[in-house]
């Protein structure tokens, strides 16, 4: 009855086969940002690269890369996000996961966006209601400067987010020159 599995860094071939057999029932989420930042960005909190290596985090990160590349090749439903709110993975920085999907898992920029939007909406049981720009869908929208389908890193720059709409209500509008 499990619907979402997180991490999966140490999944072996038997596990991958079982996940593939359950492809229409489960979603998978790597929480890769936590591992990446523990290795490369947690030194201000006393977690050096050496400490990350000594405690197995570097190995865990390498295993995650191999597993999620394999899951992608099997066309399984993988979600973006997870494990934010630590000092080294503060809230508001999770857009980096899209870049991690491209850089470490072999996704194209547009495939990473689909994992974050359409697949995310389906995991939240909003399939057919959210995750796409279409008639009858929730009016939640980000308008971004540039083409994030070609460069997901654009989403990491707050100034690139030109408009934010939730439930049809505008929360941020950098196009509105009246203010």
Image (tube, rainbow, N blue to C red):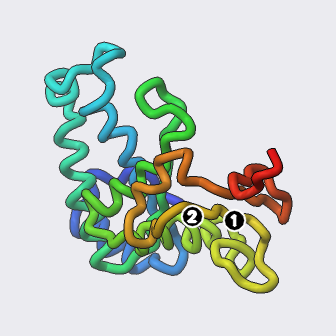
Query: Looking at the rendered structure, which numbered label has been put on residue 158?
Result: none
Q: Specify whether 162 is left or right of 138.
A: left
Specify whether residue 14 is in view: no
Image position, residue 70 (x, y; %): 25, 70
* Vertical arrangement, residue 33 with respect to residue 27, above or below: above
Q: Determine the CA span between mark 2 and mark 1.
A: 26 Å
Which residue carries the number 2 mark?
Answer: 3
Circle 2 packing at 10 Å, graded few (<14), some (14-19), many (20+), is few
Q: Nearer the viewer, residue 61 or 102?
A: 102
Return the disc, 2 or 1, that comes first in the chain's sequence.
Answer: 2
For residue 144, which quarter of the picture? bottom right
Count the marks: how many? Answer: 2
Specify whether residue 3 is in view: yes
For residue 134, which quarter of the picture? bottom right
Image position, residue 87 (x, y; %): 46, 24
* Vertical arrangement, residue 5 with respect to residue 44, above or below: below
* Vertical arrangement, residue 156 with respect to residue 137, above or below: above
Q: Residue at point 20% right, 33% down?
A: 56
For residue 75, which quarter of the picture? bottom left
- Badge nearest the viewer, 2 or 1: 1
Disc 1 secondary structure class: strand
Circle 1 packing at 10 Å, graded few (<14), some (14-19), many (20+), is some
Image position, residue 82 (x, y; %): 50, 47
Quadrant for the C terminus in the image: top right
Image position, residue 35 (x, y; %): 32, 39
* Vertical arrangement, residue 179 with respect to residue 90, above or below: below
Which residue carries the number 1 mark?
Answer: 141
Disc 2 secondary structure class: loop
């Amino acid at each position: 009855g499990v619907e979402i599995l997180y991490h999966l860094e140490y999944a072996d071939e038997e596990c991958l086969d079982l996940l593939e057999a359950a492809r229409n029932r489960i979603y998978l989420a790597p929480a890769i940002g936590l591992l990446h930042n523990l290795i490369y960005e947690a030194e201000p909190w006393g977690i050096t690269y050496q400490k990350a290596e000594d405690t197995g985090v570097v190995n865990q990160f390498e295993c995650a890369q191999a597993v999620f590349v394999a899951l992608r090749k099997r066309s399984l439903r993988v979600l973006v996000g997870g494990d934010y709110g630590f000092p080294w993975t503060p809230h508001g920085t999770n857009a980096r996961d899209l870049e991690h999907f491209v850089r470490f898992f072999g996704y194209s920029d547009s495939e990473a966006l689909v994992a974050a939007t359409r697949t995310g909406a389906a995991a939240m049981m909003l399939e057919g209601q959210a995750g796409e720009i279409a008639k009858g869908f929730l009016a939640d929208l980000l308008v971004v400067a540039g083409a994030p389908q070609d460069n997901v890193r654009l989403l990491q720059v707050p100034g690139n987010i030109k408009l934010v709409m939730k439930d049809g209500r505008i929360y941020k509008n950098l196009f509105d020159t009246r203010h």
